[in-house]
């Protein structure tokens, strides 16, 4: 029905679509450049890996454990979330 009602076209929708495409192109350039530096270019000759402090490793491990535990615990709440969505949206 929206294809039939073409008179409801708002020029701001075109501006929104153009800005979305430009934003996507800009982000593609940014992230492709990061991937290029990480995986394609070889490291400089004098560059050596620095050891990571144990406190940093522990913090990363704790954060990873919290994220994984949150994902596992979320499975038990899917039933409640589905019931809430059905009552809210009426389907």
Image (cartoon, grey):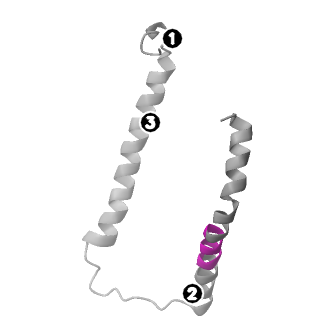
* Residue 42 quadrant: bottom left
Per the model, the C-alpha gap separating discs 3 and 1 is 21 Å
Per the model, the C-alpha gap separating discs 1 and 2 is 56 Å
Residue extent of the magenta highlight: 64-71
Determine whether the residue tagged by mark 2 lies in a helix, strand or loop.
Answer: helix
How many numbered dots are placed on residues in this image?
Answer: 3
**Label 2 Cα crowd, 10 Å radius (few <14 / some 14-19 / many 20+):** few
Where residue 8 is drawn, which disc sits there? 1
- For discs 3 and 1, the disc positioned in front in the rendered view: 1
Q: Is residue 47 above or below residue 42?
A: below
* Residue 14 quadrant: top left
x, y percentage for residue 18? 41, 30
Is there a contact, CB below 8 Å, between mark 1 and mark 2? no
Residue matched to label 3: 20
Q: Residue at x 64, y 81 (%)?
A: 62
Q: Residue at x 32, y 68 (%)?
A: 37
Q: Is residue 26 left or right of residue 89?
A: left
Which badge, 1 or 2, comes first in the chain's sequence? 1
x, y percentage for residue 81? 70, 52
Q: Is residue 50 above or below residue 84?
A: below
Q: Residue at x 34, y 85 (%)?
A: 47
* Residue 30 quadrant: bottom left
Q: Residue at x 40, y 88 (%)?
A: 49
Which badge, 3 or 2, comes first in the chain's sequence? 3
**Label 3 Cα crowd, 10 Å radius (few <14 / some 14-19 / many 20+):** few
**Label 1 Cα crowd, 10 Å radius (few <14 / some 14-19 / many 20+):** few
Is there a contact, CB below 8 Å, between mark 3 and mark 1? no
Q: Is residue 8 left or right of residue 26?
A: right
Per the model, the C-alpha gap separating discs 3 and 2 is 38 Å
Residue matched to label 2: 57
- For discs 1 and 2, the disc positioned in front in the rendered view: 1
Determine whether the residue tagged by mark 1 lies in a helix, strand or loop.
Answer: helix
């Amino acid at each position: 029905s929206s294809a039939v009602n073409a008179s409801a076209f708002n020029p701001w929708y075109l501006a929104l679509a153009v800005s979305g495409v430009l934003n996507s192109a800009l982000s593609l350039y940014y992230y492709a450049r990061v991937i290029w530096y990480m995986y394609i270019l070889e490291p400089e000759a004098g560059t050596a890996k620095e050891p990571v402090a144990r406190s940093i490793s522990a913090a990363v491990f704790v954060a990873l454990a919290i994220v994984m535990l949150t994902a596992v615990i979320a499975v038990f709440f899917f039933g409640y979330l589905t019931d809430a969505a059905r009552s809210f949206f009426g389907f």
